């Protein structure tokens, strides 16, 4: 009698490769503060050799506002998002939620987000942009992405600038960034290995 066939899979170790993190700058307003916050966070990503950062700036992308329209800009953003292993969204809070231009970027892509972790860095008034983050969690869940628990939030950050216009942060904010990146790295490696072993949805 023949032994029953068994299926075995071996995880592909990708830990020797830096985790590719796409930092999404989610504001398009004139005089926007998002690049200041984004630059601060990018410096923390680039200080970690296990991470490799790229930037997707909604304000610099000429994205269409309807599906199926010719969009050279989508041809630019699509491969960057597709090649990323993880994402961090830098978002302000507009009217208790996140910017429409950020939602447009998210909606113009689908498979690029799947089975990847998403972290958040937010800013705003007293709420620090946290209401925008909570709305974004539901959006990314629908796209089969995993949002990491801990965030970085800035409350009235325009009052926390040095003479060069760079953010002044305290130890608690630095610790929050470290925790976010630790969680993003764990999820990013775990899901990258999982996708390499078995493509998502297969």
Image: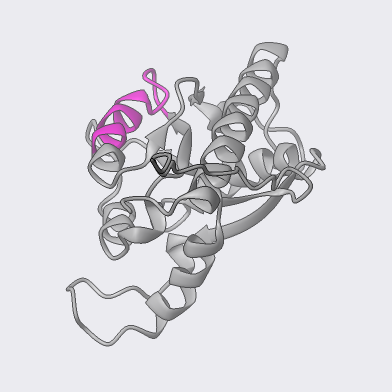
**Quarter of the figure that contains the C terminus:** bottom left
Left of 190 or right of it: where is 129? left
Q: Nearer the viewer, residue 38 or 6?
A: 6
**Quarter of the figure that contains the N terminus:** top left
Instruction: Give the magenta part as a residue range.
Output: 124-138
Residue 62 horizontal/vertical position (percent): 38, 76
Left of 90 or right of it: where is 13? right
Left of 189 or right of it: where is 2? left
Majority secondary structure in the magenta region:
helix
Outermost residue toward the top?
Answer: 172
Left of 3 or right of it: where is 162? right
Residue at image position (52%, 49%) is 197
Colouring mode (rainbow / by chain / secondary structure / one colour)? one colour
Residue 6 horizontal/vertical position (percent): 44, 41
Residue at image position (22%, 35%) is 95
Q: Quadrant of residue 43?
A: top right
Residue at image position (18%, 74%) is 67
């Amino acid at each position: 009698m023949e032994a029953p066939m068994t299926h075995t899979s071996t995880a592909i170790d990708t830990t020797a490769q830096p985790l590719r993190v796409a930092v999404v700058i989610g504001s398009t307003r004139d005089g926007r503060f998002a690049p200041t916050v984004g630059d601060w966070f990018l410096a923390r990503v680039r200080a970690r050799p296990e991470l490799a950062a790229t930037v997707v700036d909604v304000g610099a992308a000429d994205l269409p506002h309807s599906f199926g329209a010719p969009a050279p800009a989508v041809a630019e953003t699509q491969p960057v998002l597709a090649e990323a292993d993880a994402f961090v969204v830098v978002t302000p809070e507009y009217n208790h939620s996140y910017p429409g231009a950020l939602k447009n970027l998210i909606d113009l892509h689908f498979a690029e987000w799947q089975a990847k972790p998403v972290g958040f860095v937010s800013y705003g008034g007293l709420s620090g942009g946290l209401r925008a983050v909570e709305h974004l969690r539901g959006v990314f869940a629908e796209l089969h992405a995993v949002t990491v628990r801990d965030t970085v939030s800035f409350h009235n950050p325009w009052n926390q600038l040095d003479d060069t216009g760079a953010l002044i942060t305290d130890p608690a904010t630095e610790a929050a960034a470290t925790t976010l990146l630790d969680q993003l790295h764990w999820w990013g490696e775990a899901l990258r290995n999982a996708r390499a072993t078995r493509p998502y949805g297969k």
